[in-house]
Amino acid sequence: MRISHYFCVIVTSLIFCISPTTSANESHMGLHGMTLFGGKDGLFASHLPMYHHPHNVQMVMQFHFADPETDHAIKQQLEAMATAPEQLWTIVPKPFDLMRLSPLATDPIEQLQVDVVKGHFERGGINQFSQQSLIIDRIIMFTELSMKAGQDKAPNAQYRVITPTEDSSNQFLVKVIENRPEADHLLRVIQHDFIRTTQITVPLKGKLHPSPKDLADQLSIPLEHIIEIYLETGELQ
């Protein structure tokens, strides 16, 4: 009986070791905080990336809250803050494997349990809604980041244009994160002629990220029509 039990333990251990879902290269289990942005016509979340496992992924998704009252309340609050200079919200999911949000995942995750925080959840943010079910509608961006240092840097920054609907009064710019060091940069564009492209290119001029003025000039819109929601460079060195 003891021999049989020992044999089972050995077999189980071998299966665990060779299982691809437990490989360090594939599993990104952890607490994955995200910026929350949007308004009355849609909600989005962007994973807060770093150049170390398990956070070396840039991911942006569109979602809604399962509870209609919570969904409406958060959309209305974000809409009311659309022109405010400080409008950062974050969400804190229960720990999960980030790779399950990949379009290539064999066991994709469809919803998350999250707390919703006004401000940065690790930097003095205030909890607004607890234990909310978040339903994932679509993954907009998903890229596993290289953690190698000393790679060449591109002379231009690429920004993905995120749009809730074709006639939305708000659009968002998310910097495409490439080789380290980098900047996690998120901005809202308001009161403008609709941006009819999915990506814009902005010269970096030797910097990690362009300024809001650089972006406004590139889009030929007034500077006051671009509001910086989030900028982080310290975690991406």
Image: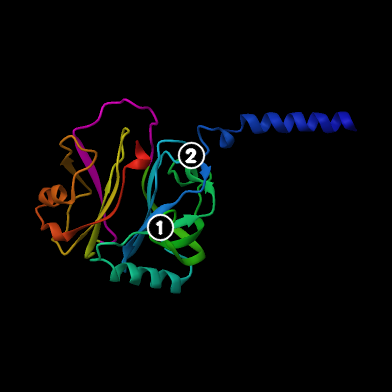
Comes first in the chain, label 1 or label 2:
2
Q: Is residue 33 left or right of residue 183?
A: right
Q: Amino acid at mark 1?
A: Thr
Give the quarter of the image for residue 9: top right
Q: What residue is shown at x 43% (from left), y 44% (from top)?
A: 103
Question: Which element type, helix, strand or loop, lies under badge 2?
Answer: loop
> What residue is shown with label 1?
90
Residue 150 magenta: yes
Which mark, by number, is residue 68?
none
Q: Amino acid at mark 2?
A: Pro
Relative to residue 223, is residue 4 depicted above or below? above
Please state the horizontal and vertical placement of residue 142, each as a whole percent of the image: 38, 43
Q: CA distance from mark 1 to mark 2?
A: 19 Å
The segment highlighted magenta reads 143-165
Q: Between 64 and 92, which is closer to the camera in this rendering?
A: 92
Please state the horizontal and vertical placement of residue 208, each as a whole percent of the image: 24, 38
Q: Residue furthest right?
A: 1
Q: What residue is shown at x 18% (from left), y 34% (from top)?
A: 206
> What residue is shown with label 2?
54
Relative to residue 231, is residue 148 depicted above or below? above
Considering the whole magenta stretch, tell me its main secondary structure: loop
Please state the horizontal and vertical placement of residue 211, each as a whole percent of the image: 18, 47
Relative to residue 57, is residue 110 depicted above or below? below
Which quarter of the rendering shows the C terminus?
top left
Q: Is residue 4 left or right of residue 143?
A: right
Q: Between 236 and 163, which is closer to the camera in this rendering?
A: 236
Q: What residue is shown at x 18% (from left), y 33% (from top)?
A: 155
Relative to residue 148, is residue 193 depicted above or below? below
Q: Between 156 and 112, which is closer to the camera in this rendering?
A: 156
Q: What residue is shown at x 39% (from left), y 56% (from top)?
A: 120
Residue 235 magenta: no
Q: Residue furthest front?
A: 124
